[in-house]
Image (cartoon, helix red, strand yellow):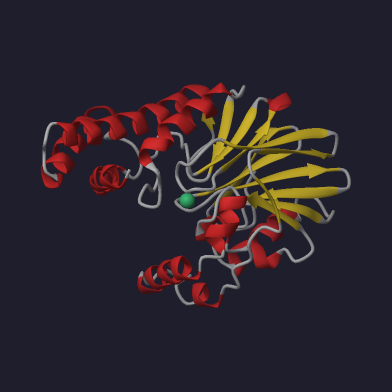
Amino acid sequence: MTAATPGTEIVEVASGVFARLHEGLANAGIIVADDGVLVIDSLRVPSFARDLIADVRHLSDKPIRYVIDTHSHWDHSWGNEEFPDSTIIGHANCRSEMLDVEKNERWIEGIAAGGAPWSEEVKTVQITPPSVIFETSMQLYFGGRRIDLHYLGRAHTSGDLFVHLRDDRLLFTGDVAQDGGVPFMLDGYIQDWVQTDDRLLELDAERFVAGHGPVGERPALAEAREFIAALASGAASAKADGQDKVTARTKVTAELQQRFGGWRGFDRVEDSVGFAYRQLDES
Ligand SMILES: [Zn+2]
């Protein structure tokens, strides 16, 4: 189904559960029940959130009761202010990151300098952290459906959560795992990420909706883990071999290129390897 917002597509991934995919930008999830709607990720700026709400209105006229933030990153959660009557749920570390004034100022500066269509609007965002938080897991019973929220450890950020619809064998993975796409890694915890992915793969799911890119099937989830594991172990062995950072960046990227060179965002890999290498010094 084509949504009203240009560049978006709404795909029904289970009965009453929709992925709103935005070409080249960030995705959202929509779960429709008889008496309300739940939204996963509020998107980057208020105008994007309003477009999302307009698209929701094609599916249901019921109130949006919940917004779930998969993580703190601006392109997923800085539309929260447009949901004043909804309960906003996130991980405890997601809330802490959204309350980190200096971190947010660095994001805003970088985005404003980028010259994108939202670079002015981003300066006006009222960052609105989740008001309901959890540490390890929580359950929501919504419209006759059980929704599990899991925290599985640090990965793409310190506060990534996974939305698991066990009866539908479906996951929303935020930015931890994409189908054939290299995630942004420079705010992540590279060595922890591999273990978090291991726990993610223990959840029973055959399909997943990622924060970016298409809806994926289970093999793509396993491949997303393989990518992170290869990058993490490549950086660690380069370091153990005594390679300097510049050499490690080049060599590990060349190794990854053979298997993952066709992925979206592969041009991010060299910086990510350098970041992983640096992070080994800190741990
Ligand atoms: Zn992110």
Quadrant, the C terminus: top left
Residue at (22, 28) in percent of width and height:
258
Q: Nearer the viewer, residue 129 or 7?
A: 129
Q: Residue at x 57, y 63 (%)?
A: 78
Q: Between residues 140 and 205, which one lies in front from this camera angle? A: 140
Q: Is residue 34 visible?
A: yes
Q: Could you tell me residue 167's position as x and y percent?
A: 73, 25
| Residue drawn at x 62%, y 57% as measured from the top left | 42
Determine whether, in the image, residue 223 is placed left or right of residue 29.
Answer: left
Furthest residue in direction right, as rendered? 35
The correct choice, above or below, for 126 with respect to 259 in the image is below
Q: Is residue 59 visible?
A: no
Using residue 52 as the reference point, say whether residue 106 is left or right of it: left
Relative to 15, does residue 119 appear above or below in the rendering? below
Nearer the observer, 100 or 197: 100
Give the vertical position of 234 relative to 77 (above or below). Answer: above
Q: Give coordinates of residue 183: x percent, y percent.
A: 40, 44
- 249 lies left or right of 71: left
The image quadrant that residue 281 belongs to is top left
- Looking at the image, which residue is at 18% across and 43% down? 249
How many numbered dots are placed on residues in this image? 0
* Residue at far front of view: 283
Q: Quadrant of residue 61?
A: bottom right
Q: Position of residue 187 (x, y in %)?
A: 40, 52
In the visual, does 177 lie left or right of 36?
left
Q: Position of residue 197 (x, y in %)?
A: 47, 30
- Specify the quadrant that holds the N terminus: top right
